[in-house]
Amino acid sequence: MEVSDPLDSSLGEREFAPGCATRVLLDHVTSKWGVLVLVALADGTQRWGELRRRATGISEKMLAQTLKTLQADGLVHREAQPTIPPRVDYSLTEDGREFVELLLPLVTWVADYAKRSG
Protein backbone atom coordinates (compact mmCIF):
# COMPACT_ATOMS: atom_id res chain seq x y z
CA MET A 1 0.00 0.00 0.00
CA GLU A 2 1.40 3.38 -1.01
CA VAL A 3 1.35 5.97 1.75
CA SER A 4 0.94 9.61 0.78
CA ASP A 5 2.62 12.51 2.50
CA PRO A 6 0.02 13.53 5.13
CA LEU A 7 1.01 17.19 4.76
CA ASP A 8 0.52 17.22 0.99
CA SER A 9 -2.38 19.67 0.68
CA SER A 10 -3.13 18.57 -2.88
CA LEU A 11 -4.21 15.19 -1.47
CA GLY A 12 -7.34 16.81 -0.07
CA GLU A 13 -8.16 18.38 -3.41
CA ARG A 14 -7.84 15.05 -5.22
CA GLU A 15 -9.23 12.59 -2.71
CA PHE A 16 -11.85 14.57 -0.81
CA ALA A 17 -13.76 16.53 -3.43
CA PRO A 18 -17.45 17.08 -2.57
CA GLY A 19 -19.48 13.98 -3.36
CA CYS A 20 -16.38 11.78 -3.63
CA ALA A 21 -16.71 8.33 -2.03
CA THR A 22 -13.71 9.00 0.21
CA ARG A 23 -15.30 12.18 1.55
CA VAL A 24 -18.60 10.42 2.23
CA LEU A 25 -16.81 7.66 4.16
CA LEU A 26 -14.74 10.24 6.05
CA ASP A 27 -17.94 12.03 7.06
CA HIS A 28 -19.36 8.75 8.40
CA VAL A 29 -16.34 7.62 10.40
CA THR A 30 -15.57 11.03 11.88
CA SER A 31 -19.11 11.89 12.88
CA LYS A 32 -19.75 12.32 16.59
CA TRP A 33 -21.70 9.08 16.88
CA GLY A 34 -19.63 7.18 14.33
CA VAL A 35 -16.49 7.67 16.39
CA LEU A 36 -18.19 6.65 19.65
CA VAL A 37 -19.75 3.51 18.15
CA LEU A 38 -16.49 2.44 16.50
CA VAL A 39 -14.53 3.00 19.71
CA ALA A 40 -17.12 0.99 21.68
CA LEU A 41 -16.83 -1.87 19.20
CA ALA A 42 -13.04 -1.83 19.56
CA ASP A 43 -13.60 -3.73 22.83
CA GLY A 44 -15.31 -6.57 20.98
CA THR A 45 -18.79 -7.69 20.01
CA GLN A 46 -21.57 -5.60 21.57
CA ARG A 47 -25.31 -5.85 21.77
CA TRP A 48 -27.69 -2.93 21.16
CA GLY A 49 -28.11 -2.01 24.83
CA GLU A 50 -24.37 -2.15 25.46
CA LEU A 51 -23.70 0.19 22.55
CA ARG A 52 -26.44 2.55 23.73
CA ARG A 53 -24.86 2.74 27.20
CA ARG A 54 -21.35 3.22 25.83
CA ALA A 55 -22.37 6.01 23.42
CA THR A 56 -23.86 8.17 26.14
CA GLY A 57 -26.54 10.53 24.87
CA ILE A 58 -27.28 8.78 21.58
CA SER A 59 -30.94 8.28 20.74
CA GLU A 60 -32.25 4.92 19.56
CA LYS A 61 -32.95 6.42 16.14
CA MET A 62 -29.43 7.82 15.79
CA LEU A 63 -27.82 4.58 17.00
CA ALA A 64 -29.82 2.60 14.44
CA GLN A 65 -28.90 5.06 11.68
CA THR A 66 -25.21 5.09 12.65
CA LEU A 67 -24.98 1.30 12.80
CA LYS A 68 -26.75 0.96 9.46
CA THR A 69 -24.41 3.50 7.86
CA LEU A 70 -21.25 1.90 9.25
CA GLN A 71 -22.54 -1.51 8.19
CA ALA A 72 -23.16 -0.24 4.64
CA ASP A 73 -19.62 1.19 4.67
CA GLY A 74 -18.30 -2.29 5.47
CA LEU A 75 -16.89 -1.37 8.88
CA VAL A 76 -19.51 -2.99 11.14
CA HIS A 77 -20.94 -6.50 10.99
CA ARG A 78 -24.49 -7.18 12.22
CA GLU A 79 -25.44 -10.71 13.20
CA ALA A 80 -28.98 -11.59 14.23
CA GLN A 81 -29.15 -14.62 16.52
CA PRO A 82 -32.14 -16.95 16.01
CA THR A 83 -33.26 -16.80 19.63
CA ILE A 84 -36.34 -15.73 21.52
CA PRO A 85 -36.21 -12.91 22.37
CA PRO A 86 -34.24 -11.87 19.30
CA ARG A 87 -30.59 -11.03 19.86
CA VAL A 88 -28.45 -8.92 17.55
CA ASP A 89 -24.69 -8.65 17.92
CA TYR A 90 -22.53 -5.94 16.37
CA SER A 91 -18.81 -6.24 15.75
CA LEU A 92 -16.10 -4.67 13.64
CA THR A 93 -15.26 -6.17 10.28
CA GLU A 94 -11.62 -6.66 9.33
CA ASP A 95 -11.65 -3.23 7.66
CA GLY A 96 -13.36 -1.79 10.72
CA ARG A 97 -10.65 -3.18 13.00
CA GLU A 98 -7.96 -1.77 10.72
CA PHE A 99 -9.59 1.66 10.82
CA VAL A 100 -10.09 1.60 14.60
CA GLU A 101 -6.40 0.79 15.09
CA LEU A 102 -5.70 4.11 13.38
CA LEU A 103 -8.54 5.93 15.16
CA LEU A 104 -7.68 5.00 18.76
CA PRO A 105 -4.40 6.98 18.91
CA LEU A 106 -6.30 10.03 17.63
CA VAL A 107 -9.02 9.58 20.26
CA THR A 108 -6.32 9.24 22.94
CA TRP A 109 -4.62 12.42 21.71
CA VAL A 110 -7.94 14.32 21.77
CA ALA A 111 -8.63 13.18 25.35
CA ASP A 112 -5.12 14.16 26.47
CA TYR A 113 -5.36 17.52 24.72
CA ALA A 114 -8.74 18.23 26.32
CA LYS A 115 -7.23 17.58 29.77
CA ARG A 116 -4.24 19.83 29.06
CA SER A 117 -6.21 22.69 27.62
CA GLY A 118 -9.04 22.77 29.85
Image (cartoon, rainbow, N blue to C red):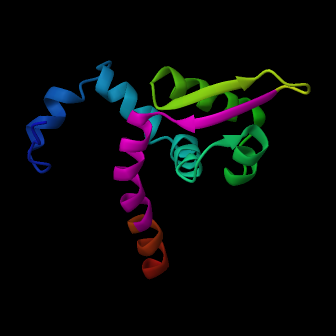
Point out the residue furthest to the front here: 82
Which SS does the magenta portion mostly show? Answer: helix
Residue 55 or residue 95, whichever sits in front: 95
Task: Measuring from the top left, give residue 47's x and y in whole percent.
Answer: 73, 40
Q: Is residue 77 left or right of residue 22?
A: right
Question: In terms of image quadrants, where is residue 32?
Answer: top right
Q: Identify the residue at image location x=19%, y=28%.
A: 15
Say whether residue 48 is magenta: no
Residue 85 or residue 22, whichever sits in front: 85
Q: How many numbered marks appear?
A: 0
Question: In terms of image quadrants, where is residue 30?
Answer: top left
In the image, residue 95 sits, relative to residue 24, either above or below, namely: below
Residue 28 or residue 44, whichever sits in front: 44
Task: Measuring from the top left, give residue 3's x and y in whole percent.
Answer: 11, 42
In the image, residue 78 sits, relative to residue 39, either above or below, namely: above
Say whether residue 91 is magenta: yes
Task: Measuring from the top left, give residue 60's x and y in whole percent.
Answer: 77, 34
Q: Identify the residue at image location x=66%, y=26%.
A: 79
Q: What span is colored magenta in the figure? A: 87-108
Q: Is residue 110 left or right of residue 90?
A: left
In the image, residue 55 sits, relative to residue 16, either above or below, namely: below
Q: Quadrant of the N terminus?
A: top left
Q: Identify the residue at image location x=56%, y=29%.
A: 77
Task: Measuring from the top left, give residue 90's x and y in whole percent.
Answer: 63, 35
